[in-house]
Amino acid sequence: MSDDMLLHFSSNSSNQSDQSSLPTKIAKLEARMVGKTSSAVTAPAQVQSTLWSAAVKFGSPSDSLPPESLVSSDDSEDENGGEFLIQANTQKRQKVEDSTLFEHVEAAADARQVIVESDSNKVGPDVNKKKHGRGRGSSASSRGRGYRVCDPTRMETVFSPSNGQLENSHKMQERVSNDHPGLDGHTSLEEVTSLRAKVAALEEELTKSREENSDHRNQRQQLEKELKDLKDYELQMKPKRMKIISDLLITISKAERQEARMKVRQDSLRLGNVGVVRAGTVISEAWEDGQAFKDLNTHLRNLLENKEAVERQRKLLKKRQSDKGEGSDTEAVHDDVLFLDEVYKSRLASIKREEETVMRDRDRYELEKGRLIREMKRIRDEDGSRFNNFQILNHRYALLNLLGKGGFSEVYKAFDLVEHRYVACKLHGLHAQWSEDKKQSYIRHAIREYNIHKTLVHPHIVRLWDIFEIDPNTFCTVLEYCSGKDLDIVLKATPVLPEKEARIIIVQIFQGLVYLNKRSQKIIHYDLKPGNVLFDELGFAKVTDFGLSKIVEDDVGSQGMELTSQGAGTYWYLPPECFELNKTPLISSKVDVWSVGILFYQMLFGRRPFGHDQSQEKILREDTIIKARKVDFPSRPSVSNEAKDFIRRCLTYSQAERPDVLTVAQDPYLSYTKK
Ligand SMILES: Nc1ncnc2c1ncn2[C@@H]1O[C@H](COP(=O)(O)OP(=O)(O)OP(=O)(O)O)[C@@H](O)[C@H]1O
C-alpha cells in the first residue's frame, strides 16, 4: 500500500463528498439516456472508471466491479438496459464507497498490525511462532477482504522506519482521518481508539516477548553448559563404568570357574578320572572309572552270577527228572518239576530286566563321562591358556571363560563393553615354531575367511562382528555369541533326535544355505558338520566357520568350480566328487546338500551313514566315500518314509543328478506351509 492508495481514496471520497449534486447528475444522465446522446455513455463511463479504479485499489475482487461487467453494461443498446445501467452504477458506486471507507480504516489497522509483526519478526523463533499464529489469523481475514495482502516490503515504503514504525502508524492513522472527512465520524474514532489500544497491547506483548527471548537465550546457554559438563562427565566416567561392568563380569566368571571345577571333582568321583599309569619307566595317562561305574559293574557281575546259579539249578532239575525215569509217580513228579522250572524261569526273566536297566544306566553314565571328559579338557585348556586372566582386548572385549579349543584357536566367551552384549572371541594363534611361509598362509586363510564371513547377515548364520590383531602371532575374530552349545555337543548328549526336531534344524540350515546361494557372489560352505552348527539361547540354529568356504566366481560353468583345496574338510560329511583323484574335481552347492543329508541321517539314527566307525585316514585309504553309492537305513528308530526319501535325494551319488541347494530348499519335505 502506498500514497497512491490515499490519493485514490481521496479522489474517490471527493466524489463521494459531492453527494448533494449526485441526484442532479443522475437526473441529467437519465435525460441524456432517454435522448440516447453519445454523451450518455461517457458520463457513466467516468463514474465507472473512478469506481473501478477505487475498486481495484481498495475493494476485494468479489466486492469490486469487474471491468467486463462495466463494459458489457456500457455496450448495451437496450433502452431499459441503459436505465438499469445508471441505477446499477449508482448502487454499485454507493457500495464501493461504503466498502472503501470501511476497508480504509481496516487497512490502517492492518498496517499497524504488519508493522508490529515485522518488528516482532526480528525478536526470535519462539516469539515468531506466536506471531505467526496471529499473523495467519490476520492474513485469513485479509483473504476474506481480498486486496489487503500483508506484504511487509510494501508496507515499509509507506511506513518509513526512520522515526519508529509505531509512531508512523499513528501518523498514518491521522493522515487517513485528515484526508477522509468521512472517517471523522463516531465509528472511526472508536476504531482508532481501539486500534491504539491494540497497538499498546501489542507493544507490551513485544516487550514481554523480548524479555522472554532473552530468558530463553540464557536458558539455552545454561543448558549448553550443562550438556557439555555431562559429556565431560560421561567421558570421565566411561572407563570407570567399563571397569565396574568388567569387575562384575569377572566376579561372576570366577564363580562359574569355581563351580565348574567343583562339579568336575564331584563327577570325577562318580564317573572317573584320568590317572597316571606307570609301566616300567614309561608314564602315561589312563582313564580310571569312578564309583558309579564300579557299582554298576558289581551289580552286573552279581546279576550274572545269580543268573548262572539259577540256570545251574534249572539244569539239575531237568537232569533229576530224566534220572527218575518212567517208573516213578509221573504225575506228581511232573507237577513238581513244572513248578520249580516256573520259579527259575521267572527269576531269570527278572534278572534280564535288571540287566537291561543297568545297561541303560551304563549308557547314561557313558554320556555323562563324555561330557565330563570334555569339561576336564576345557578346564585344562583354560588353565593352560595365556588369555585366562580376564584381559580386555582392543579396549572393549572383556574376556571371560573359555568356551572351547579348536585345532588352531581358542574361543572365549567375552563381553563387548561398547555394544554391551556377549560375544565369542576366537583367538587364532600362530605357533612360534611354524615357518614364516606357514604363518603367512594361515593369516591369508584367516583374512579370506573374514572377508567372506563379514558380509553375511542372516538369522541362520553366525554374525562376524570384528577382527583385530593382538600381537604379531595372534589375532582375534569377534563372533555372535551362541549360548546354546553346538550340534556336536547336543548329539553327544542325545545321539538320536526325534524326527520333528531334526527336521526343523535341517530347515534352518537350508535357509542359511539359500541365503548363501542367492547372493551375487554365491558361497559353498564346504565344512558343514555338527560342530559348525550352533544354537542361540532361543534354539535357533546358525551355521558358522567359513574357513573352508569357496566363493563361486561368475564365470564358473554349470558343472561347478575347481576344488583346489582337496584333502581339507571332514570326510564323513563330504560327497564322492571331493575324493576324485584322476582330475581336479568340479564342485558346487551340491557339496553342502550332501553334507546336510549326512547331518540329517546322523540326527535321526545316531550314526553317520558312511564310515561311522572309521578314522579320517581309514576313510581315505579304503575309499569309503567313493564307494558310498547307496544309503541304507536301520530299522530302528522308526523314521518316516518321507524323511528317508529326502535323505536319498540329498545323498544322490551322481553329482549331476543330485539337486542343488535352491532346488532342495523347495522340497515338499521341508515345507511348513499348511496344506
Ligand atoms: N560363536 C560362538 N558362540 C559360542 N560358542 C562358540 C562359538 N564359536 C565357537 N564356539 C565354541 O567354541 C568351541 C571351539 O570352537 P572352534 O570353532 O574353534 O572349534 P572346532 O570347530 O571344534 O575346531 P576347528 O574349527 O579347529 O575344527 C566349540 O565348542 C564351539 O562350540
Image (cartoon, rainbow, N blue to C red):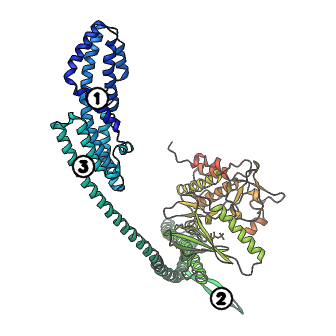
Three-letter amino acid code at disc 3?
Val
Q: Of 578 and 516, which appears nearest the observer?
A: 516
Query: Percent position (x, y) of residue 58?
Result: 31, 32
Tell me if residue 310 can be seen.
Answer: no
Secondary element at image label 3: helix
Q: Of 297 and 629, which appears nearest the observer?
A: 629
Residue linked to disc 2? 277
Say if disc 1 is inside 8 Å of ligand 1: no
Q: Of 540 and 9, which appears nearest the observer?
A: 9
Question: Which of the two discs, 1 and 3, labels the residue nearer the N terminus?
Answer: 1
Tell me if residue 250 can be seen.
Answer: yes
Corner quadrant of residue 480: bottom right
Query: Which numbered tag is attached to residue 12?
Result: 1
Q: Is 123 displayed left or right of 655 in the figure?
A: left
Write the residue at 21% across / 17% down: 24
Write the residue at 46% across / 75% down: 235
